[in-house]
Image (cartoon, helix red, strand yellow):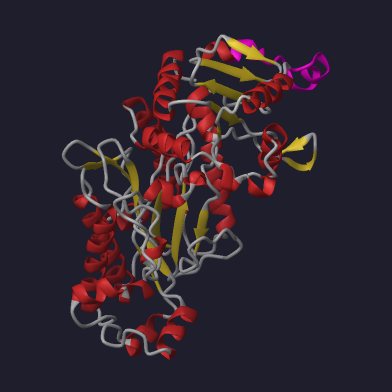
Amino acid sequence: MFKSEIYLNRRRILKDSVGSGLILFLGNDESPMNATDNCYPFRQEYSFIYYFGCDSNAGLAAVLDVDEDKDYLFGDDVSIDDQIWMGAQPLIRDLGLKSGITNSAEYSCLKPMITKALTKGRKIHFLPTCRADIKLKLEDITGIPHSNIDNSTSPELIKAVVDQRSVKEDFEIKEIEQAIDISSQMYSLLLRETKPGLKEEYLLGRMMSLMLSKGSMVSFPAILSRNGKTLHNHTYDNILKDGDLLLIDSGVKSTEHYSSDLTRTFPVSGKFTPRQKAIYEIVLNSQLKAISETKPDVLYKDIHLKVAEVMVEGLKSVGIMKGNTQDAASVGAHALFYPHGLGHMIGLAVHDMEVLGEDNVGYDNEISRSSQFGLSALRLGRRLQKGFVVTAEPGIYFIPRLIDLWKSQNKFTDFINYDEVEKYKDFEGIRIEDDILVTKTGSRVLGTPVPKSVNDIESIMNS
């Protein structure tokens, strides 16, 4: 946990933003793996961590009484029987004091407080959740049917939380960099050990072993695959072969649960083929363009579109695309090869706050999500501010079924050379990703650098 003053200040800002009523936070419960005593590693709900710091105890709840300016923590102390199995656990009262809360009570006291407030006509604010068990708890506490929980969340609270958590403070940035530094060590290990004949799961195990030795956990299930054209590939049973490209998209958590999210693509043999090098450098130039354009007061959607133009120019140079570059990018012809967005917010969660609604985080009253294929997948389109931390992760993929579909529809034939594209159906995909801090005048890549130039990658892999 950080110092109690940090949580006190965060809650004060939140209460001032919401204005009135009660703000209800429910922490996560344990998630059984195959029995109630065998659970998945516990992860606290991220806004609960942000405002209260209580990261290791399941079954907690908190209420901020905005009108009375009082904060409450609810939970049950662990019984002696449970402590025999779990060891000594902190008292709920002591957990509250660590985050500056002097009012604590048993969990059973929560529902009567909410019921009393509802009978007085007071507003109960709560956030969206992706967990069915928490929706059932909200139903029990508030009386709102679980099927209507999503429609009953508080727009005022969502906006206040997004506004507050979007801008990272210096100590949060240090936590993100701590996570990136562990990721950097993992990628350095992969650069040294990747070679033909290895199974993907072996490299995943080596990477996870290093992470665990640093006392960390994954921030999301790692993608490590020779099948880079499958954007979220979570199978690891392929044997790497000479001529393959290995795409690794992974992240870890810092001590205070802040996330990293990095992607690299390596040649399994240690050397890019001429064709691989040409496509790789198009992706790298696209990412460097994104980083150079990232600065305050710029729409991230506009940066995405500038990156698309760099990509079109590069694909034209190898004969895959043709025609006017700006026209091709504006109509989305490049999305055949780049069907996702440039990046997203990152912080406590790897897709930070997106449980509150992707459009609530990545868009606002100024800009709304596009319906155009590819551009519609852009998670973050809004205007950047100093203190935002975002990912920049362009990629190029050759997806046979998508190619066949567009070709059969004669789609964008003014911009796509399908005869040349056919020659790349066996190519798979390349993606490069870093975590970027928006500074006062520009941006900087966070953490220990991970090699990404062709020369650096080949030099390390062959040293």
Q: Residue furthest left?
A: 441
Q: Give residue 324's quadrant in the image.
A: bottom left
On the picture, is 209 further left or further right than 309?
right
Q: 9 or 319: which is nearer to us?
A: 9
Residue at figure coordinates x 34%, y 60% from the top left? 394
Whether residue 104 is visible, yes or no, is yes
Q: Is residue 399 above or below residue 371?
A: below
Most frequent secondary structure within the magenta stretch: helix
Q: Give residue 369's quadrant in the image.
A: bottom left
Residue 67 locus on image (x, y percent): 49, 19
Residue 154 locus on image (x, y percent): 51, 39
Residue at figure coordinates x 36%, y 53% from the top left? 343
Residue 89 locus on image (x, y percent): 69, 16
Q: Is residue 303 above or below residue 294?
A: below
Residue at figure coordinates x 75%, y 17% from the top left? 78
- Magenta highlight range: 78-95
